[in-house]
Amino acid sequence: MAAASTMFSDCSPSSMTARLLPLRRIHIDSTLFRSSISSPPLPCRRTISSAFAARMSAETSAKVIDGKSIAKQIRDEINIEISRMKDATGVVPGLAVILVGSRKDSQTYVRNKKKACEAVGVTSHEVNLSEDCTEEEVLNSIAGFNNDPSIHGILVQLPLPRHIDEENILNSVSIEKDVDGFHPLNIGRLAMRGREPLFVPCTPKGCIELLHRSGVEIKGKKAVVIGRSNIVGMPAALLLQRENATVTIVHSYTKNPEEITRQADIVISAAGVANMVRGSWIKPGGVVIDVGINAVDDPESHRGYRLVGDVCYQEACTVASAITPVPGGVGPMTIAMLLSNTLSSAKRVLNLK
Ligand SMILES: *[C@@H]1O[C@H](CO)[C@@H](O)[C@H](O)[C@H]1NC(C)=O
Ligand SMILES: *[C@@H]1O[C@H](CO)[C@@H](O)[C@H](O)[C@H]1NC(C)=O
């Protein structure tokens, strides 16, 4: 398997001449996909003839975990629950989104969140603040929404301009409305046994939901999380541990990441490095959840780039038993989980089960 690097065009070093620029921000928030992707995920194909493929061809190729259709199913379920809630109580869930500045990517995410809210019956309220607004102005809008009973979830679109202290801002969101799950109290509860967070961060929650809905057992399994960001890696590891997996975190200082990852029954990769995880990193029969959304140069695409995961899909899908594609895997789950968190917040307030 070591020789694989030149055999797979999509994973070869030349295609990785890292146009990694949108990586960090896309990585934070993958909701872009709702509008941009219309085709179903690619099947797991063995397109190459090589020693590697020959060795693997005896095995069945991985089941593709279709995040797009699972996310749609979840949105449909949410839509039905909201109609019932409206009929029974006259109340619908409300989400407030605070956008600071005019980053194009953030505007796109906010627009997509708004559309997704409308489609399931959540009312959305936006506040757009200018790039040079003060921290106090942001805190004031949050305070207003904290005190507004028609708002059940508050989301501050990240990243914030540099002069605004992200920690202060996230601390000021009422934990009862912290639908992003980034408040330190919610993260702390997630980490502690016997405590329940009110909300769990959307992307890692989406990863676990994909595993559950694909019938993957987590309890007692060895899981590896690649990456330790506050937004994905760290909470994903905590969630897997709550599911009673044995969890190892692989990060930039880990020695032998390949060997450690190969022991995992379940891999969640959130490294933000295109095609870093090769087929040889995957345990035969393992399950792969790829959170990475990385742009790589692609002259054949009309945009000049295309999006790939952290995992070299063509290689991994011949080894794994199930795998998420990029795009169309974890991406669509993030907004679905945001809607789900907003709905549960409203149910909590209304005392509904
Ligand atoms: C706020 O900005 C978003 C994203 O650019 C836009 O879709 C929305 O219409 C704006 N809302 C208001 C109230 O200006
Ligand atoms: C994990 O183990 C704890 C302790 O035995 C148990 O209470 C909990 O229900 C288990 N959770 C899952 C998801 O298996």
Image (tube, rainbow, N blue to C red):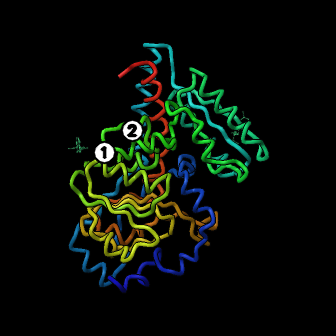
The residue under label 1 is 213
Left/right of residue 53 with respect to residue 117 in the rendered view: left
Q: Is residue 84 left or right of residue 140?
A: left
- Quick one: label 2, few (<14), some, or many (20+) residues within 10 Å? few
Q: Nearer the viewer, residue 50 or 347?
A: 347
Image point 30% across, 60% down: which residue? 223
Label of residue 73 in the image: 2
Q: Nearer the viewer, mark 1 or mark 2?
A: 1
Residue drawn at the location 59% of the way across and 68% of the way down: 20
x%, y% of residue 79? 45, 29
Quadrant for the N terminus in the image: bottom left
Q: Position of residue 231 (x, y in %)?
A: 50, 52
How far, Cα to Cα, is label 1 from label 2? Answer: 11 Å
Identity of the residue drawn at 31% across and 59% down: 247
Instruction: Name which of mark 1 and mark 2 comes first in the sequence.
Output: 2
Q: Position of residue 200 (x, y in %)?
A: 43, 42
Element marked by disc 1: helix
For residue 10, say whether it is visible.
yes
Could you tell me how many numbered marks the image carries?
2
Q: Position of residue 274 (x, y in %)?
A: 50, 69
Task: Ligand 1: give its quadrant.
Answer: top right
- In terms of secondary structure, where does tag 2 sit? helix
Assess mark 1: CB under 8 A from ligand 2?
no
